[in-house]
Every structure is written in structure tokens, then in C-alpha cells.
Image: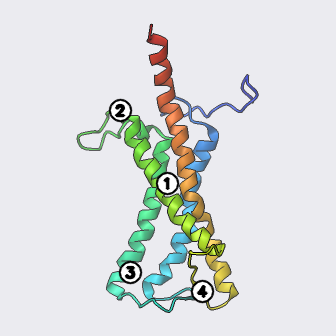
């Protein structure tokens, strides 16, 4: 089915004020899966297994620090990825009723747009520097690996996570268009 303008219609979400574009729903659901290989690749580091990385300056982290740090970082990454679903779901517009104080209230668009934009920019900068190191850009240092297989495994597992920032920024823009543009149109139409 196509819309009158020749494009696919936006998805008719039952819990958002305005329809969410299909690509935004797919992108929001893809983000946790984009991060999952990296989160899984990171877990052996909690037990001082270096995954073939060679870093002469690295000293092993004590296990009582490494285990909660590495597992906590992986859980936090996935939690932030799942939080991106709020940019395409109704709970990103109206706070769930079980939340104290704000439950059931409308969420101002900027309360989601500002943190999502800052997070997307931060993730883009973080992963962008890693990409520059892998591309051997002068001034960016890439870690070595024991052999090519370890390097390939690292790139296969880590590379998808480099899309996280741009995906969040695209979702944030779609959220902005859906939540703010209709309000701007209403303001312009009511102005004399």
C-alpha cells in the first residue's frame, strides 16, 4: 500500500500522538542488536582474557573491579539502547503511570530531544575516533592484535556499534519532526 505522495505511509502506532515512520521503528528496534556483538565481545575482559589484543601499557584490572565494571558497562549500553525505543513509542511522549511524580504526564519534547542529541553526538564522537584509529589516520592509535583472526573478530564485533550514534541522531530528528513540527504549524496557523 502506498500513500498519495508515492511514499509508504507511516506506521499507525496505537500509542503515539502522531504516526511514527516505519524506518524509525525499525531503527529503534535494531539499535540493541547493533550493540549486542560488542557487549558480548567485551565480557571476556572481565576475566582478564584480552581477546588477542596487545597493549604494552595495559595492566590487568583486579577481578573485583573488572567483573562489575565490564558487566555493568555492557548492561548500561543495552539499557541505553533500549531507551531509544522511547523515541518511537508512547512512553516517550507520556510518562508511564508507575513512575513517581511524573507518571501519566506529557513529556516535553525537549526533555527527550536534548539528551538523545547529546548522547548521539557523544556516541558518534567516541566511535568515530575508533574508526579513525582503524583507518590508520595519523594521531589516532589503534591497538594491535596477536594475529589477523583476533583483529578480524574485533572488527566484526565492534564495527556495528559505530552506527549507534548516527542511528540515535536519526531517531531524534524523526522524534523532533513528529512532536515539534505539528505544534509549530498550529502556532503559525493561529497567528494573525
Residue 90 position in % (x across, y down): 45, 37
Across and down, in percent, residue 140 comes to 56, 75
Q: Is residue 17 visible?
A: no
The answer to whether any part of residue 74 appears in the image is yes
Circle 2 residue: 106
Q: Work out whether residue 19 or residue 132 is closer to the camera in this orientation and state it.
A: 132
Q: Which residue is mark 1?
A: 121
Extreme residue toward the front, this view: 138
Q: Quick one: label 2 or label 1, which is nearer the N terminus?
A: 2
Q: Earlier in the sequence, mark 3 or mark 4?
A: 3
Q: Earlier in the sequence, mark 4 or mark 2?
A: 2
Quick one: quadrant of the C terminus? top left
Q: In the rendered structure, are the residues bearing label 1 and label 4 in contact, judged by CB atoms less than 8 Å apart?
A: no
Element on which disc 4 rests:
strand
Tag 4 residue:
144
Q: CA distance from mark 3 to mark 2?
A: 39 Å
Q: Are marks 3 and 2 in contact (CB under 8 Å)?
A: no
* Crowdedness near tag 2: few (<14), some (14–19) or many (≥20) residues, C-alpha within 10 Å: some
Spatial CA distance of label 2 from label 1 is 26 Å
Residue 67: numbered disc: 3
Q: Residue at x 67, y 30 (%)?
A: 9
How far, Cα to Cα, is label 3 from label 4? 23 Å
Residue at the far top: name it. 192
For discs 2 and 1, the disc positioned in front in the rendered view: 1
Q: Is 32 above or below relative to 136?
A: above
Amino acid at each position: 500500500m502506498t500513500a498519495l505522495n508515492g511514499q509508504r505511509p507511516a506506521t499507525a502506532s496505537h500509542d503515539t500522538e502522531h504516526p511514527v515512520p516505519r524506518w524509525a521503528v525499525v531503527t529503534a528496534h535494531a539499535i540493541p542488536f547493533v550493540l549486542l556483538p560488542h557487549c558480548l565481545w567485551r565480557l571476556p575482559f572481565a576475566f582478564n582474557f584480552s581477546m588477542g589484543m596487545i597493549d604494552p601499557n595495559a595492566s590487568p584490572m583486579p577481578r573485583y573491579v573488572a567483573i562489575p565494571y565490564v558487566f555493568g558497562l555492557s548492561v548500561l549500553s543495552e539499557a541505553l539502547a533500549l531507551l531509544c525505543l522511547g523515541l518511537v513509542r508512547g512512553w516517550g511522549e507520556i510518562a508511564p503511570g508507575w513512575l513517581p511524580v511524573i507518571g501519566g504526564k506529557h513529556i516535553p519534547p525537549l526533555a527527550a530531544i536534548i539528551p538523545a542529541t547529546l548522547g548521539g553526538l557523544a556516541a558518534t564522537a567516541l566511535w568515530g575516533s575508533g574508526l579513525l584509529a582503524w583507518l590508520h589516520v595519523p594521531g589516532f592509535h589503534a591497538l594491535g592484535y596477536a594475529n589477523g583472526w583476533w583483529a578480524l573478530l574485533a572488527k566484526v564485533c565492534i564495527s556495528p556499534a559505530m552506527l549507534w550514534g548516527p542511528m540515535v541522531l536519526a531517531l531524534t530528528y524523526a522524534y523532533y519532526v513528529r512532536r515539534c513540527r505539528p505544534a509549530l504549524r498550529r502556532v503559525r496557523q493561529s497567528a494573525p
